[in-house]
Amino acid sequence: MRCSAALLLALLCTSLIPCGASAQPYPAKPLRLIVPDATGGSPDTLGRILAQKLADSLGWQMVVDNRPGASGILAAEIAAKAPPDGYTLFMSTTSVWAILPSLRKNLPYDAVASFMPVTRIASTSNVLVVNLSVPAKSVAELVRLAKERPGSLNYASAGIASPAHLAGEMLNLLADVKMTHVPYKGAGPALLDVIAGSVQLIITSPIAAGPHINTGRVRALASTGAQRNPGLPDLPTIAESVPGYDISQSWGITVPAGTLPSIVTLLNTEIVRALRLPDVRERIARTGAVPVGDTPEEFSAFMAAERARLGNVISRTGIVLAD
């Protein structure tokens, strides 16, 4: 018995030595956060707030890698195919996990199987903003203008099948108007063209639009949720003029499938801790978004519910988003 026990202990120690010798502290090099939007967009803004805080408080360096285009498909594909070693994070969006799976059959990633959820960063209802030359001062006036000039109003989006595109098509359908969609490679460039007057309006997040609203470069008409945005309580909802209108947007951190659960747990712990810091919550709240910071299981359930809800909306309304 003593001999067998000694042999078992020796084998156990032998098996542990290589692991202990080769193990490195995590992270041992900078993390990469892939952002499916251009600089200045909502995912970029949130990503940079998070990267700065992790660097300041933990010494974790995080490189923000902007990969705009195709409503997040390009970035999602890069993230899905990255090594599952904990060094590639993805700022996933409502478009990536809920809208695109309902619209495209041949995505280069699987919204469920390609990623492991870490935590939801923030959620918000979007805002409808117009160029200052647009005479409408309310949603009702905008709808009236669109009816008087069918096809003459253009709305920008961060790309085909982005939340802004779906939001615009929902407004077309529910208000019985016809506005023309103009896709861009990210919310940042789209907003710049709204400010310049190349397009008349955009429905986007207050994170991206907030600075331009505050400086008077665009005019905010309404928010898009069923209830008023708590960060913009004086702004009416589109639903107050167009009954049934409701669309919001969320962002969260995911990692490639196959990443060690221990790394996912560590990432969740540190990111949630950062999101609970008063200065981080204040910075996110100032953008009009609500910080979240949930568990991987809660984030997974949220994504599934949004997939079902928005998939039902797309199916029920018959919205078709052409390539």
Image: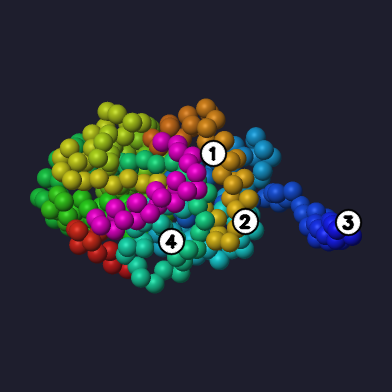
Q: Which mark is residue 111?
A: 4
The residues colored magenta run 290-313
Residue 41 part of the magenta-drawn span: no
Q: Which numbered disc, 3 or 1, marks the residue that appears first in the sequence?
A: 3
Residue 276: % across, % down: 52, 32
Residue shown at 45% from the left, 36% from the top = 291
Which residue is tagged 3?
A: 2
Residue 292 part of the magenta-drawn span: yes
Which residue is tagged 2?
A: 260
Q: Quadrant of residue 289?
A: top left
Nearer the observer, 274 or 289: 274
Which residue is tagged 1?
A: 272
Q: In the shown orientation, is residue 160 left or right of residue 143?
A: right
Residue 7: % across, % down: 87, 61
Q: Is the residue under label 1 in contact with that under label 3 (CB below 8 Å)?
A: no
Instruction: Tell me: residue 207, above or below residue 75.
Output: above
Q: Which numbered disc, 4 or 3, marks the residue that appears first in the sequence?
A: 3
